[in-house]
Amino acid sequence: MLSRQVATAGARVGAARGFSVLTAAEEFPGLPSTSPGEKKGSVTSVTTLPSGLTVVTENASLTSTVSLTFPNAGSSSEASSEAGAAIASRYLSFKSGSGLSSALIVRNIEDVGATPFSSAGRRGATVGFTAAKENAAFIAPLLATQCSFEKWDVKEAQQLAAAEAAEATSNAQVSLSDSIYAAAFGAQSAMGRSYYTAGASRAAIISFYERNYILNGAVLAATGIDDHEAFLRMVEEEFPSTAGAAEPSQAAYLGGEARVSAPSTGYAHVALAFEGPTSAPLMNVMKHCLNSGSAMPFAAPGIIGVYGGSEPSGASSTVDALSTVVGSAPSSDIVAEAKAAAKTEALTALDSGSKSLADAMTASVLDSCGFSAKALSESYDSITADDVAKAHAAMLKSKVSLAAVGDISDVPYQATIASRFG
């Protein structure tokens, strides 16, 4: 009897509330699905326009990052009279130009909730933003704004560049990086000079900017773009063509020495470098081959090496350890581990957010004129132990470069170290 009453009462409540009549989707229209469909694979498209601008897009990202990279807008492209122009030019991103004020440009970006960014270095400069997919094409033309070099914008850029340069010079790691480039390419060369240089004049900044911030040779990478052809039409309509092409900087590896004595630091920072292979995947595998507990590897286009540090009294031992790591031919087991680590690192970057993916797309286009996750994976799979052995032997045949920063009284000189590599 009691059970029948409970069942009857439950049925009445259910009928009154409509539980047995309406589904969740019917009762709450627009409710997100609790069983989303399978994630679609990414499709990448690459097109080079008549202007010389290469556009690369992919369609699977949930947000859009659009970045415009000028490969010749780094400090290695500065003329001798333009030292400091590259770092100052970075701060002219999103400034007045093409009939738009800085305030209006920033307002358009902020109104759609986009996050702008800019960066520069020895090799190239990038300007871009991350935004919701539906807003990417709307504000992308702001990346191609032709700077009008308003006095207040240039003055602010000079001030920001000076502040960044001052902060960098107090950093031992930055000083070590600058020193290894100076040692490898020559302190007076464009590649050897520090990117962190202040004091560029207005005329130098304008000259550098107008010569290197051009679309011919640039790469526009965009993630989360569903229609590549529609995006291309927007770019052709909104991105102005520019005459001429920026000349890529020529950097010849020399091999030398750079020492910055600062005894008050109470520490010795040391780096050894050699000329590296031209293939980016092979360079990355080589870098992982040099990874050990006593040395930290580094690699950049044209240069590869290791660095470490110690108390001043242990500087000589640190150099010995670095020399042993870099001078030892990697075994087949080390190469296999390095290949796996380098490949994982490269593929992980593709799945680390839309900005990381845009960076990887740009790097691949600049390195091989194309991009696909499959091709990237295969580029690592195709590297053999013999390839690494030949690259390592060729590396050691180049002249070793030495950089030392800090209390370096016990750091051996480059000539002494060079004798260890024949």
Image (cartoon, rainbow, N blue to C red):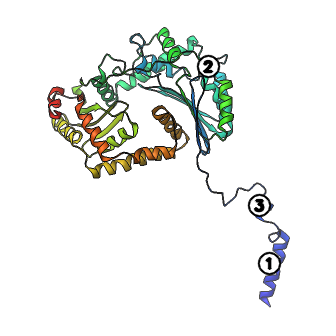
Q: Residue at x 78, y 88 (%)?
A: 2
The three-letter amino acid code for the residue at tag 3 is Ala
Horizontally, is 83 left or right of 67 in the view? left
| Circle 2: element type | loop
Q: Is residue 274 visible?
A: yes
The three-letter amino acid code for the residue at tag 2 is Ser
Q: Nearer the viewer, mark 1 or mark 3?
A: 3
| Circle 3: element type | helix
Look at mark 2 in the image and give the residue it sits on.
241
Horizontally, is 115 left or right of 345 in the view? right
The percent coordinates of residue 195 (x first, y second) are 39, 22
Q: Earlier in the sequence, mark 3 or mark 2?
A: 3
Whether residues under marks 3 and 2 lie with C-beta atoms below 8 angstroms apart, the answer is: no
Horizontally, is 310 left or right of 46 in the view? left
Q: Earlier in the sequence, mark 1 or mark 3?
A: 1
| Circle 1: element type | helix
Whole-angstrom CA distance, mark 1 to mark 3, is: 23 Å
Say which quadrant the C terminus sits in.
Answer: top left
Look at mark 1 in the image and give the residue it sits on.
10
Q: Residue at x 38, y 36 (%)?
A: 279
Residue sitting nearer the eye, 417 or 204: 417
Quarter of image, res 56? top right
The three-letter amino acid code for the residue at tag 1 is Gly
The percent coordinates of residue 409 (x first, y second) are 16, 27
Q: Going by the picture, which residue comes out furthest to the bottom?
A: 1
Quarter of image, res 6? bottom right
Q: Residue at x 67, y 16 (%)?
A: 99
Q: Earlier in the sequence, mark 1 or mark 2?
A: 1
Q: Going by the picture, which residue comes out furthest to the top?
A: 203
Look at mark 3 in the image and give the residue it sits on.
25
The percent coordinates of residue 197 (x first, y second) are 39, 18
